Amino acid sequence: MATTVGQQQLVAARDAFVEGDMASLAGLPLPLQQSWQRSRAAGVLPGQEPYYPPLQGDGRRLRDAGDRRLARCVQPELEQLWAAFGGRGWTMFCANRHGMVIAQQAHGLEDAALLRPIQVGRQLGEAEIGTTAPAVSLADDMPALVRGNEHYLQRFAPVFCLSEPLHDLDGQVCGAIDITGLGERDPALLQGYFRQAALASENRLFHTLADVHLLAVQHDPRWLATPLQGLLAVQEDGQLRAANRVARRLLGLPRRGPLPLLSMETVFAGASAAQRRHLLQPGPAHRVRLGEGSAVYLQHLRAPRAPRTRAPAPAAVAAAPLREQQREAARRAAHAADGNLSLAARQLGVSRTTLYKLLRD
């Protein structure tokens, strides 16, 4: 979403909008127009100070188990993004589907009054602070950029914010990751990195499922074990339980919402009988035919995990195979880039430092 009118024109448009002139919104992208309208309908006035509700909980311990799970999946990506783009005058966070901050990465010595209230446990919806990038992402399931006077509240005229939506196992929007700060950044560069971070976070959600087969799919096998891989969660009886957004696109499944009742034989109807027999069997990535002139590479990542009475902490169990996948992805990317580690790091959406660490492991 790019700025389409000058900042001074936006100030005049906001004043006219408050007086009831709907035509004044014409210079804004449609999602921002709709957000301004929702903000006004909630009783927010452009000239007021932002309203920050009290923190939910103690600002550290999240009450909802789903919020805690999403925060764990997002936090590693926030840390990597912060290493690349963080600094004084900026903060990065994840909001849940209701606009409450559930994870954050910040400088720790923030002296900007506009950023201090952004804390874990704080509700930051349109009804509280008007139009922001996370609010637009949550409402419209799309990447969002809000700069300067594109914000509904005049108080946020110095602020830049960009966000990317997150999807749950049913393909529904469950949150958004955001960078907010005072100043300006390159939106095109940030959007690429934040999209990769969102895909990686969603993939971690799939790794929290214990009672399913987990399969990876991609047209290009080099993108297996990266954030760009499709993931399928398959029940022991062969029924498809969930698919991430990459897999949905690759396999022609509904883009959003719970999946219809589908068996693996239906999903891979174009595969040969021998290929279908191996769908849920361990082994290296192999080519599976989808239809005339179309195929994917499929890899069985793991089988359902049997319940254990005594086991390591869940995070430790899930982290080991995921870490090995990250190392393999780093090796493949470095090989595909002919040793150009800067290019390989950009393709994976990680910093050079992170790539070096993965290659040394």
Image (cartoon, rainbow, N blue to C red):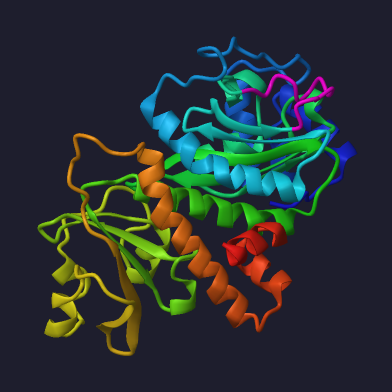
- The reply to whether the magenta stretch includes residue 108 is yes
SS assignment for the magenta stretch, majority: loop
Q: Is residue 103 left or right of residue 179?
A: left
**Residue at x 76%, y 32% (from the top left corner):** 107
- The quadrant in which residue 126 appears is top right
Q: Nearer the viewer, residue 349 or 124?
A: 349
**Region of the chain picked out in magenta, as a range:** 107-119
Q: Which residue lies furthest to the top in this view?
A: 54
Q: Is residue 229 left or right of residue 268?
A: right
**Residue at x 54%, y 12% (from the top left corner):** 58
Examine the rendering and report whether any part of residue 19 can be seen.
no
Q: Give the answer, above or below, for where 280 lies relative to 147.
A: below
- The reply to whether the magenta stretch includes residue 68 is no
**For the image shown, how many numbered marks are present on the structure?**
0
Q: Where is residue 2 in the image (x, y as percent from the top left)?
A: 74, 52
Q: Give the answer, above or below, for where 8 lies relative to 61.
A: below
Q: Where is residue 98 in the image (x, y as percent from the top left)?
A: 48, 27
**Residue at x 78%, y 23% (from the top left corner):** 114
Q: In which quarter of the image is the C terminus?
A: bottom right
- The quadrant in which residue 119 appears is top right
- The quadrant in which residue 307 appears is top left
Q: Give the answer, above or below, for where 208 lies relative to 36.
A: below
Examine the rendering and report whether any part of residue 45 can be seen.
yes
Q: In this view, does 186 lie to the left or right of 192?
A: right
Q: Give the answer, above or below, for where 125 lies relative to 294.
A: above
Q: Is residue 227 left or right of residue 321?
A: right
Q: Where is residue 225 in the image (x, y as percent from the top left)?
A: 45, 66
**Residue at x 24%, y 70% (from the top left corner):** 282
